[in-house]
Amino acid sequence: MSDPFLPYGRQSLDEADIAAVVEVLHSDFLTQGPAVPRFEKAVAGWCGARHGIALANGTATLHCAAKALGLGHGDRLWTSPITFVASANAGRYCGAKIDFVDIDPATALMCPERLEAKLVQAEKDGTLPKIVVPVHFAGQSCDMPRLHALGQKYGFKILEDAAHALGGEFLGERIGNAKWSDAVSHSFHPVKIITSGEGGMITTNDDELAWRIATLRTHGITREPDRMQGESHGPWYYQQLELGFNYRLTDLQAALGASQMGKLEAFARRRRELADLYDRELAGLPLRPLARDPRGISGWHLYMIVLDLDAIRPRTRRQVFESLRAQGLGVNVHYIPVHLQPDYARLGFESGMFPEAERYYEACITLPLFPAMTDADVTRVRAALEQALAA
Ligand SMILES: *Cc1c(COP(=O)(O)O)cnc(C)c1O
């Protein structure tokens, strides 16, 4: 008898989540109703940020926040090459040029020393970025006070990509509080920490930025007379102030998200336990987990291993990966460096430009991690790894 397939990530829904969605179906509002502000308050309140603005997905949050932060044609956005393509694509939607800062191989986070060196050079060349997007990869926070200090010195805005990190902390405070940045982007795709089906949110402490993102979410339209040019024509009147989008979240999704928020603490705790168990179970194998910054607690969206390619020779990462898949484990690879995508090669990027990211990509494997996993599942992953690595 073979064990069931174990995916790398999966949502955890219960009857209360389902009831919350059904309740919306029985109500007057399927969209633009009360569930959206309720969800916004729940996430912003958890994070300790003044505003939460819910959008259709995480990608939309990055796009709207970048635009609201003033990113436009000819401007520059820098991010990590080890991220989902959306972190970089958001800048391209605004007409900006994209560049990357190589990672610290220990953590796979954007390397602050490399960022600083690149800023020094960019200042000389007149190519400083308008926005830097640090990605809290796998759930671990970047060194935000340090990035904030660089932002002050070199005049860039900071848009945190926290799609992996809800439920995590840094320096004793919750990721998403936007204390060291202009805005924080969250995603509620089903593989992430909590889900609304599709969905995303910006958390920020900047009142004007929050208003602008909320306006961009609905076509750039306002119904507030104070914000209009000239006089309102009457109660029906609205004005489009700039070119926005329809990036709204539905009330069905928001109700699911708000219900899931009630379980965030338990989800985060279980993810942490499983990650600790993985660390213990995998000790002694020819691989390493990503280094943990003792100043923070990861949100643990992903549990990554980096194979010691020299030690496992003649086995390759691909063989290990295929063996794990054949043993019913939905392992994955996060991420293919963004600059190696054909659509980025077209912009002039090529292999060799971000060598640490490329080396990391050659050796990494994402193991299954989600709150409903049992301790026995972790033991099973260890046994499968041992088999995959056996000469
Ligand atoms: C998932 C993800 C996004 C995009 O979120 P969607 O909700 O899928 O649009 C952005 N950045 C990172 C790092 C992600 O993992």
Image (cartoon, helix red, strand yellow):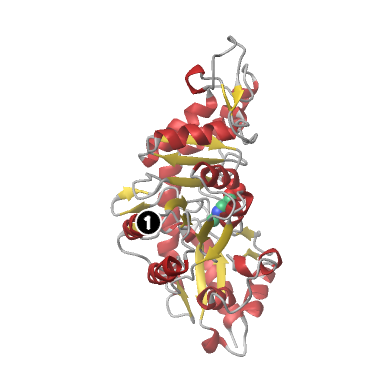
Number of numbered callouts drawn: 1
The image shows residue 230 at horizontal and vertical percentages of 54, 18
In the rendered view, would you say 111 is above or below 233?
below
**Disc 1: which residue:** 151
Name the residue: 51% across, 51% down. Answer: 163
Work out whether residue 308 or residue 66 is closer to the camera in this orientation and state it.
66
Residue at disc 1, secondary structure: helix
Any part of residue 189 in sight:
no
In the rendered view, would you say 109 is above or below 323?
above
Dividing the picture into quadrants, the one containing residue 92 is bottom right
In the displayed structure, does residue 129 sit left or right of residue 246? left
Name the residue: 39% across, 51% down. Answer: 168
Disc 1 under 8 Å from ligand 1? The reply is no
In the rendered view, would you say 31 is above or below 360?
above
- The quarter of the rendered structure image containing the N terminus is bottom right
Q: Which kind of residue does numbered mark 1 sit on? A: Gly
Dividing the picture into quadrants, the one containing residue 292 is bottom left
The image shows residue 312 at horizontal and vertical percentages of 56, 86
The image shows residue 216 at horizontal and vertical percentages of 57, 35
Name the residue: 63% across, 50% down. Answer: 93
